[in-house]
Image (cartoon, rainbow, N blue to C red):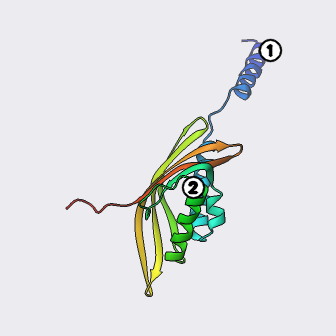
Amino acid sequence: MRPQHWISGLVLSIALFLTTPIASAEPKEDVGAATTKWSEAFSENSVERIVALYAKDGVLWGTASPTVRADPAAIRAYYEGTFKAVPGVKASLGNQLIRIYGNTAVNTGYYSFSFVKDGETKSIPARFSFTYVKDGQNWAIVDHHSSAMPSPPK
């Protein structure tokens, strides 16, 4: 092979490499970060921060809720009630399975809620599903389901 052919081939390979889209884990990382923001806002007992993470038409079926909360006022009321009933409650994220479908993402996993009652730390393991829709640069929660982890079968 002549030197100029080798160089031409190298230049063509580099050009193809630079113009070929490269798969990125970025959307998964962004959804993971959005879930972390939820956990941080929850652990700070910040009603304002947590409600801002939900889309205007977002839905919440909370761990302690007998009903679905389907508007911002109802979601706000749920968190106000939760933080009043269990002051200082915190959420710690466990394993998460994040799937991306274009501008929609689903994050399924578990978390643990911890709080102090009568001087003793209590923990409630729970499972979650967050469904997000991309809103500009942010992922907004459009559906959030949470339920206490069932006891293992005996």
In the rendered image, the quadrant that contains the N terminus is top right
Residue under the image location 56 percent in, 65 percent down: 77
Residue under the image location 74 percent in, 22 percent down: 10
Whether residue 125 sits left or right of residue 83 in the image: it is: left
Residue 86 seen anywhere in this rendered image of the structure: no
Q: Which mark is residue 35?
A: 2
Q: Nearer the viewer, mark 2 or mark 1?
A: 2
Classify 71 as above or below 45.
above
Residue 142 seen anywhere in this rendered image of the structure: yes
Secondary structure type for disc 1: helix
Please state the horizontal and vertical placement of residue 64, each as a whole percent of the image: 43, 65
Q: Amino acid at mark 2?
A: Thr
Classify 128 as above or below 83.
above
In the rendered image, the quadrant that contains the C terminus is bottom left
Q: Nearer the viewer, residue 20 or 74?
A: 74
Q: Amino acid at mark 1?
A: Gln
Classify 43 as above or below 61.
below
Q: Which residue is mark 1?
A: 4
Q: Nearer the viewer, residue 109 or 51?
A: 51
